[in-house]
Structures are given as structure tokens and as C-alpha cells.
Amino acid sequence: MKIDNKISHFLTGPYIFFGFLFIPLLLMGLLEHHPIMAGVSSLAIAYLFATYSGVEIDTETKKFRNYNKQFGLFKTGRWRSLDDYIGVTLVPIRKVYRMYSRSNRSNTSHKTEYRIYLVNQAKRPAIPIKKCKTQDEGYKCLDEFAIWLHKPVYSPK
């Protein structure tokens, strides 16, 4: 069985703003008949919004690969053995984004997500293999991965 999970987009959080900066350039290029500016802007938009990273697991051959999917089309990454990892674990991750204004006031946003990791020989989380939104969903997926991969569940340190 093959498992394919998307882990994260190229642009996340407040950094999405940088991707939207290319939209006015695209519109200017189209309205002013500048095909080079429109083409470069559309390529930048396609790359920034369609590129993401993920993990693909083949349970029959006991191999996995971390990959980047460029433009949402081409996967780049090499296959590695699952035998180098001793188990799986669930780790809560709190993402905090802080932006400062020119008057040095800060605006902070945060969210908690839960990631399932492969555990290395040092009993530390090493490779993320699934991202979950809630803790209950995380525990359910953790049990599924423990069964699919025939690995024990470890508690994070």
C-alpha cells in the first residue's frame, strides 16, 4: 500500500503575502501588453502557490521518501528504508507568527497542529509523516500508522 501525505505548503502563514505581490505585476503585464513581465509573474505565482512538501510511504517495500512537489507536478526526493527507524510518535507543534509594525507594536497569531513523526535510533522524532489538525485525529492516525508500518508507539520527550 502506498501512503502519500502533504506536510506543508511552500508559503504558509503571513508569508502568503509575498505570493500575492506578484498578482499586480501579472495584471500590469497583461493590461500593458508586456508578455515577459506577465509570463515571469505567472511562473512565480504558479511556483509559490503550487509547490509543497510531503512524504510518500510504500509499506510493501518498507521504504519512504520526503519530497518536494515542484509546481504541483514533479516530485523530487530519494527513497530511504523504514528499517532505520524504530517507531512512531505524535508531537504537538505550536506555530507562532509575530509581525512588528513600524511603531514597534507586535501582532501575534498562533495555532497548534499535531504531527506524526518516525522515531530514530536515539528515540527522537526525526521525519514528519502526517499533519493533523486536532489531537483526537492525531491519535487515530498514529494508531493507523503503527499498524500499517508495524512499529511501536513512543511518547515524545
Image (tube, rainbow, N blue to C red):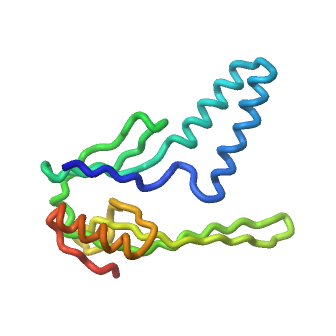
Quadrant for residue 108, please give it: bottom right
Q: Say which quadrant the C terminus sits in.
A: bottom left
| Callout count | 0
In the image, is 62 to the left or to the right of 24?
A: left
Q: Position of residue 145 (x, y in %)?
A: 24, 64
Q: Residue at x 18, y 62 (%)?
A: 149
Residue at the right extreme of this rendering: 103
In the image, is 11 to the left or to the right of 103?
A: left
Q: Position of residue 152 (x, y in %)?
A: 18, 73
Quadrant for residue 47, please give it: top right
Q: Residue at x 34, y 67 (%)?
A: 116
In the image, is 77 to the left or to the right of 14?
A: left
Q: Position of residue 90 (x, y in %)?
A: 34, 73
Compared to residue 20, the image places residue 104 above or below, namely below
Q: Residue at x 30, y 67 (%)?
A: 141
Q: Position of residue 80 (x, y in %)?
A: 23, 50
Compared to residue 147, the image places residue 154 above or below, namely below
Q: Residue at x 14, y 65 (%)?
A: 150
